[in-house]
Amino acid sequence: MSESARFGPPWATTAVFAAFFTLLVYAGLSLIFDDGFVVGRYPFGFALLVVGLGVVARSLGPARGIEVDAHGVTSLETKVHIPWSSVEEVRVDETEYQARQSRMVTLGGGAYGEIQFVPAWGLTPRASISRVDNAAALLAVVADRTGSRALFPPDWESAAADPLEPDPAASSRPRGAGLVALAFKVGPKIGKMALALLKTIKPGAAVLALGAYSLVFSWKFAVVLLLHILVHELGHVFAMFRSGVPVKGVYLIPFFGGAAVSKGVAKTRWNSAYIALMGPVWGAAFSGGLAAAFFVLAGEYPFLAAAAAWGALINLFNLFPIFPLDGGRILGSLTLSSSRGIGIPIMFGSLALGLGLAYVAQLELLVLMVLLGFFELTLLLGARSLRPALALMQRPLSSEHVAHFYRLLFPQSGKAKERRVKQQVVAYERQLQEARQSPMTKTQGLWVLAGYLAVVASLVVILYVTSGVEGGGNPIDLLS
């Protein structure tokens, strides 16, 4: 666990948003004009250039922002360091820069000097003022470590256990109880679980997707395609149930696939990888069952082989190491568990891989997936500095608490302010959940990697033995 937290200018977030909007324009041009990806070639290259230049500029430029650790707070721009015990006052004043209504935080350290910082958005401060992203979280750390009770949220507790301490109940697993007892338990549990899984499916979206697919394909193929997507998403839902993650529902989106939407984030990286992997596991099992039925019936129904092959292809595509596909999420869980800080750069590389594949293979759908990946990556960037910050705090921190500090920094009034605060509460809650995720151990990482490779191998075998069946069609032709 890191012993210091750094809050700096949002260079990475800015690069992500610039690439996001550039790619959005690129995708729009590709859909409007018949030339497709040829029209979007230059915006595509510009998007990669924005991300690359942002990363290079940040790596070559001087360190900026604020760093906090157990000893004190340091301005990386002015090199002023103030021990926590020497902070004499913490002021939150109106800033003179009104590009966006905001406030400036000043830490007075007597003989040590003073440190000032402002939220990064829309401000052009003096060189002596640090611009920081996630300033509300930084103000929470400062208030906690200096005991500035005038800044405290109304219900902030005076002391609490380490907020990063894992929940023992989350890691516990029920032990076996013998074959007879297990037989009596499994039946009712399976029925109850099946009913719970089916309740998560949104019927309106399912009917809409079935109708849309039936207009383009035959109704039989539409049903098979819908079943593959449902089985895959229910695999994710099952894993969410097992991991204690609340489920909002399964949504089927015509020509886009489906999504198992949760109401939170898993408590551990191990659980996140488990949730991501179980969709393809269920999909592989379903495709394997269809393939087995085809061979058991002596090849009389080639449609079964085609259905198995298409299911294998869909699940294999989802295992590409491209965020936010399942393979990309597994990759993220593995790399973000590393203490070497390789997670975020690898996630950037994953998105770049997705863009390159979309360009080479002319896959417009993959461009949309990468756009979603860029958006989700901003949440990971916001949570990156929160984890070490939480480890430094002596009081518990919730999304409502962070929103309180956000209100102090952005003193807008009226309905617009409250709506903005509510949006921030949702974003902060997600960031806090991401920050509190405990990393995987090396053993768990090896198990996840072995499971990933085993599922990929199974899907390749299913695709190989079923794709060439006469009368069944060959989905591999799509890749040629």
Image: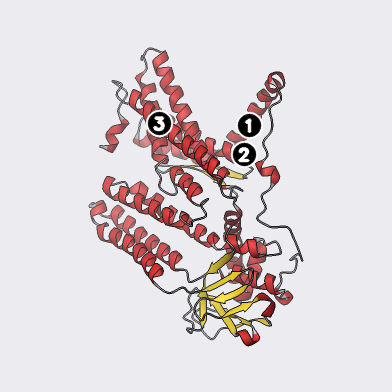
User: At 37% from the left edge and 36% from the top edge, which residue is drawn?
Assistant: 215
Q: Position of residue 323 (x, y in %)?
A: 43, 49
**Residue under circle 3?**
457
Label whose residue precedes the other's in the sequence (2 or 1): 1
Q: Are marks 2 and 1 in contact (CB under 8 Å)?
A: yes
Q: Quadrant of residue 371?
A: bottom left
Please identify, in this view, whether the residue under mark 2 or under mark 3 is nearer the observer. 3
Between the C-alphas of marks 2 and 1, the distance is: 9 Å
In the displayed structure, 196 sits above or below 88; it is above
In the displayed structure, 67 sits above or below 292; it is below
Q: Residue furthest right?
A: 158
Q: Position of residue 244 (x, y in %)?
A: 64, 43
Q: Element type at marker 1?
A: helix
User: At 23% from the left edge and 54% from the top edge, which residue is drawn?
Assistant: 38
Q: Nearer the viewer, residue 406 or 196?
A: 406
**Residue under circle 2?**
241
The amino acid type of the residue labelled 2 equals Phe
The circle drawn on residue 193 is: 1
Between the C-alphas of marks 1 and 3, the distance is: 29 Å
Q: Quadrant of the C terminus?
A: top left
Residue 233 seen in this snapshot? no
Q: Position of residue 431 (x, y in %)?
A: 57, 58
Q: Is residue 338 left or right of residue 460?
A: right
Please identify, in this view, whether the residue under mark 1 or under mark 3 is nearer the observer. 3
The amino acid type of the residue labelled 3 equals Ala
Please identify, in this view, whether the residue under mark 2 or under mark 1 is nearer the observer. 2
